[in-house]
Image (cartoon, rainbow, N blue to C red):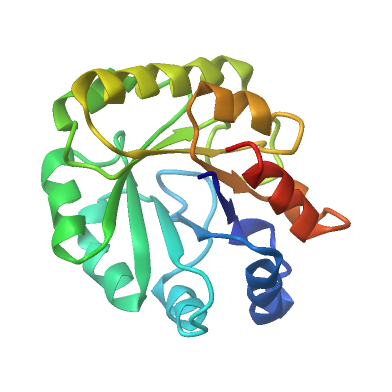
């Protein structure tokens, strides 16, 4: 089944509660939190406080994407705030294996994110230690960017790697996702699509989500 995860980065910040409820009613599966620190990426966004408020609405499971340096220092705080999934970047986690097990020990699903220029080979040595591989199809830091076509084939590479190893894990795609490109991403092996400006700007969010889910 294809999951759709609206990115809170594209929401109306003055009405976050309403926006979260709107995505819940439209049929979203996860709520995607892009957490940025101004160091690993050139932007600053949400912290555990916003996540705790959103999780307290008990609507959509929270998918937390940590685009931060030293993610191991903040895993417990985001888990306690209500995260369902916590994803760290392979480029930022010096001891990736340890951090993934730290996430699982906190009761969350563990994810690994790869920037567009990062090879999926780094996943080979942690196969079985993560529940989700997040393929960035834009350079992280800002919403509303155009998808980088060269990153698409990475989805298929990871899908083959997982199948050859007999490992079950979601493949999530984040960056420039819209209804036009979604069929290609799903065909390559994506099972979770993060949608930002295209979804929040759609005339009918429920139809947008239904159309993407129908691909799987």
The image shows residue 141 at horizontal and vertical percentages of 55, 44
**Image height of 79 relative to 40, above or below:** below
**Image height of 20 relative to 67, above or below:** below
Specify whether 31 is left or right of 124: right
Q: Residue at x 45, y 67 (%)?
A: 61
Q: Nearer the viewer, residue 44 or 121?
A: 121
Where's the C terminus, which quadrant? top right
The image shows residue 121 at horizontal and vertical percentages of 27, 18
The image shows residue 211 at horizontal and vertical percentages of 73, 45
Count of marks, rendered view: 0
The image quadrant that residue 79 belongs to is bottom left
Q: Residue at x 68, y 72 (%)?
A: 25
Q: Nearer the viewer, residue 179 or 215?
A: 215
Q: Residue at x 24, y 24 (%)?
A: 122
Q: Is residue 168 visible?
A: yes
The image shows residue 41 at horizontal and vertical percentages of 47, 44
**Image height of 57 relative to 191, above or below:** below
Specify whether 13 is left or right of 86: right
Q: Nearer the viewer, residue 108 or 50?
A: 108
- Residue found at the very far right of the displayed protein: 203
Q: Is residue 147 visible?
A: no
């Amino acid at each position: 089944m294809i999951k759709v995860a609206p990115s809170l980065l594209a929401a109306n910040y003055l009405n976050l509660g309403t926006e979260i409820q709107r995505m819940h009613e439209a049929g979203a599966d996860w709520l995607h939190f892009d957490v940025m620190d101004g160091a690993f990426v050139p932007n600053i966004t949400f912290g555990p406080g916003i996540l705790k408020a959103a999780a307290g609405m008990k609507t959509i499971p929270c998918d937390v994407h940590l685009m931060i340096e030293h993610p191991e220092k903040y895993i417990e705080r985001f888990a306690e705030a209500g995260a369902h999934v916590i994803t760290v970047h392979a480029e930022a986690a010096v001891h990736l294996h340890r951090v993934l097990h730290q996430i699982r020990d906190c009761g969350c699903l563990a994810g690994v994110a790869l920037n567009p220029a990062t090879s999926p080979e780094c996943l080979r040595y942690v196969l079985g230690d993560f529940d989700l591989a997040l393929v960035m199809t834009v350079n992280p830091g800002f919403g509303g960017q155009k998808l980088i076509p060269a990153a698409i084939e990475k989805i298929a590479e990871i899908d083959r790697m997982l199948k050859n190893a007999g490992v079950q894990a979601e493949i999530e795609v984040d960056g420039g996702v819209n209804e036009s490109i979604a069929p290609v991403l799903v065909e390559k092996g994506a099972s979770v699509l993060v949608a930002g400006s295209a979804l929040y700007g759609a005339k009918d969010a429920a139809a947008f989500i239904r159309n993407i889910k129908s691909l799987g």
